[in-house]
DNA sequence: TCGCTAATGAGAACCATTACCAATAAGAAT
DNA sequence: ATTCTTATTGGTAATGGTTCTCATTAGCGA
């Protein structure tokens, strides 16, 4: 049961949740749930490819539902190195994905790698932090 | 002095070093150096853009000399999710960088972001791990 | 020498994550 | 039902990379 609750929580969330945030959300429905269970099930779900794990550099991992590399809501991240804000962007995704697929084909052949996914992030200063620096 | 030793260590290393590996290497030259100093100087060097910090998902950060986004040795990473092996690849970089620059221009305009760098990684199974799974 | 500032190092503290382990649930087979 | 097995769970302790604290030192100009 906790597993479905975790998935449902991730599905309803519009943001990228940390393990603790997921724990707190699921905790409202299953008050007895343990943090361990959350981590364990997240690991499982990542293994099946249903969930993706991200590191935005603030010391805690974030999780979000995987929409598949071509899914309608597939996006990449724009991360402010000053305030930690994360912006999902879907612009330019089509061109990127096209190039990525080409690159993946080339890389998996050359290095004999079975590529399962990619991670693309841009780092910089958001509009609120640009001035302050 | 420790700062130069750290830079020199990173320069000589062909791999991506963890803080501890850097500490051990510098320790041979400056036996009195502390781990704290390594972290502190790495943070400083990252701030100046001389060093890049990466997370390959094994719980410890890796550091490497930054060659600039168009530098001769600029590369992206291919990470085995099973054994943790990391392959640097420079193939396809030109096309990627070209598209990235275009994307950066678009993103920084649309989201009013000052983009300082990007992170591209592919995840999957390396040739040694493909069979076992 | 005196005072000031930046850099250092040892160890403690922090905190997300993982390991451990006993308890429970759900079947399947007898 | 009863036993056996297997998967899942939750509380707690441990782990370990990173950061913080704070007293010490080095450098340097006045």
Image: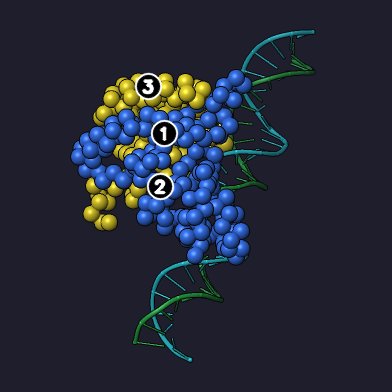
Chain colours: A yellow, B blue, C cyan, D green
User: On the rendered structure, is D26 left or right of A10?
Assistant: right
Residue placed at 49% from the left, 65% from the top? B1
Q: Nearer the viewer, mark 1 or mark 2?
A: 1
Seen from the viewer's position, the closer of residues D7 and A75 is A75
**Pointer 3 indicates a residue of which chain?**
A
Spatial separation of the CA atoms under disc 2 and disc 3: 26 Å
Spatial separation of the CA atoms under disc 1 and disc 2: 14 Å
Where disc 3 sits, the SS reads helix
| Mark carried by residue A101 | 3
Spatial separation of the CA atoms under disc 3 and disc 1: 16 Å
Residue placed at 39% from the left, 25% from the top? A103
Q: Which quadrant would the C terminus of chain A be assigned to in this image?
A: bottom left
Seen from the viewer's position, the closer of residues A115 and B98 is B98
| Residue indicated by mark 2 | B66
| Residue indicated by mark 1 | B90
Q: Quadrant of residue A75?
A: top left
Seen from the viewer's position, the closer of residues A13 and B19 is B19
**Pointer 2 indicates a residue of which chain?**
B
Q: Nearer the viewer, mark 2 or mark 3?
A: 2
Task: Mark 1 or mark 2: name the one nearer the start of the chain.
Answer: 2
Where disc 2 sits, the SS reads loop
Residue density around tag 2, few if under 14, some if 14–19, many if 20 or more, within 10 Å: some
Residue placed at 25% from the left, 29% from the top? A91
Give percent across and percent down for residue B130: 57, 21
């Amino acid at each position: 049961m906790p597993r479905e609750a975790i998935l449902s929580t991730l599905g309803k969330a519009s943001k990228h949740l940390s393990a603790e945030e997921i724990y707190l959300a699921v905790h409202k429905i299953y008050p007895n749930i343990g943090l361990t269970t959350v981590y364990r099930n997240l690991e499982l779900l990542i293994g099946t490819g249903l969930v993706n794990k991200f590191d935005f550099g603030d010391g805690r991992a974030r999780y979000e539902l995987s929409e598949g590399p071509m899914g309608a809501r597939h996006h990449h991240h724009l991360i402010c190195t000053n305030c930690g804000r994360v912006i999902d962007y879907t612009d330019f995704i089509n061109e990127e994905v096209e190039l990525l697929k080409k690159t993946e084909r080339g890389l998996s052949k050359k290095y004999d790698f079975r590529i399962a996914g990619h991670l693309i992030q841009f780092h910089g200063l958001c509009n609120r932090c640009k001035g302050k620096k």
